[in-house]
Amino acid sequence: MAKFAILCYHRIGTGGVPIFSELPLEVFEEQIRYVRKRYRVISLGQLTRELQDPVAGTQSVAITFDDGYRDLYSQAFPILRRYGVPATVYLPAECIESGEAPWYDRVFVAVQAYPGAELLLDLDAPRSFELSSRASRIAAASEIMLYLRTVPDARRRAVCAELEARVSMPEQELADRMLTWDQIREMQAGGISFGSHTMSHAVVSRLPEAEAKRELVESKLMLEKKLQEPVGDFAFPFGRPADCGRAAFPLLAEAGYRSAVTTIEGVNASGANPYSLRRTQIGENHHLATFAFKLNELFIRAGEQNTADIWASSSLDVQREASVRSSPFVSSR
């Protein structure tokens, strides 16, 4: 049986925004070199076609990036070209257009900049966060993010506004972090594909239907206008079942998308739902042996997957799901 793994990366580089994610350039190059040598590397477009008409017995890997950080142009793009590896970058269109870092980055920066050693914030109940170190501030921001993934988008916006109102935001740390349209078009000419990551990186399942439709449709239209080519691929922000929701599937089809990726771990096989493709985030393993083992394990365990069970559990609280993880983005974005 043909099997297809989709790897999910965010930023390539270290230091600054995004605070939650770091991957040294040399580690990324080592991983790309390994994947190129050991697996059949294909584009996401080819993957979606072969899901319908697979090449028997193959193990294929596609590379994707979420969020559109600028180091994808300066760091990742030269490596991808060097090794002849295709990739797809999912863009939150509103952030690219404005040049402003997404709201979740602002949460992490706000908590880092918060004066004092304790933050009191009303979430589901009044909460106190200890901020005595950089690590504790990252942990606090992670917990706030996990909460914000579970609430209606209007509530999410209100909490973010309250937090920022209590901080002198260091806007210089947030500046020049996103790809520009010129950089995107240069990457496009160099063989990189682009897909939608909504307009604003909203949690799709927490939006009213009309707003969800707007996020899906307007982001697609903006990208197509800027790139002058059809955009058929979508990535759910955060990407766990509770973040996606089955209600989005008909909206994606109506908007004209051919695929949507989640962050549900595993590989894809013939007959997979094109609007809930599995992806895995193992790139932040800094040891190549661990990365190689986990990628091989994905293919070995493919027969144990049960999509029905995963989607049946989509109502599970995201906070409980991620409570054992160090970052809300390890299994999420």
Image: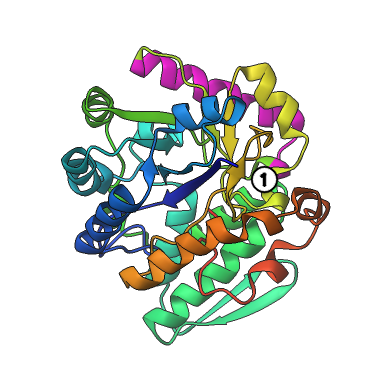
Report x, y in % for residue 266.
59, 54
Is 215 inside the magenta-drawn segment?
A: yes
- Residue tagged 1: 153
Residue 125 in sight here:
yes
**Residue at image x 62%, y 25%?**
214
Relative to residue 179, is residue 305 depicted above or below? Answer: below
Residue 60 x, y percent position in the rendering: 45, 43
Observer-nearest residue: 259 or 255? 259
Asked whether, in this view, residue 33 is left or right of residue 119, the answer is: left
**Secondary structure beneath label 1:** helix
Q: Nearer the viewer, residue 255 or 59?
A: 59
- Residue 109 is situated, as x and y percent measured from the top left of the image, at 39, 63
The boundaries of the magenta stretch are: 205-227
Q: Position of residue 113 (x, y in %)?
A: 37, 69
Q: Does residue 284 appear to the left or right of 56 in the view shown?
A: left
Note whether 201 is above or below 9 in the view shown.
above
Quick one: label 1, few (<14), some, or many (20+) residues within 10 Å? some
Q: Is residue 306 left or right of residue 48?
A: right
Characterize the magenta stretch by its predominant secondary structure. Answer: helix
Amino acid under label 1? Asp
Tell me what residue is drawn at x 49 percent, y 17 percent: 221
**Residue 315 falls in which quadrant of the image?**
bottom right
Q: Is residue 158 magenta?
A: no
In which quarter of the view is residue 91 placed? top left
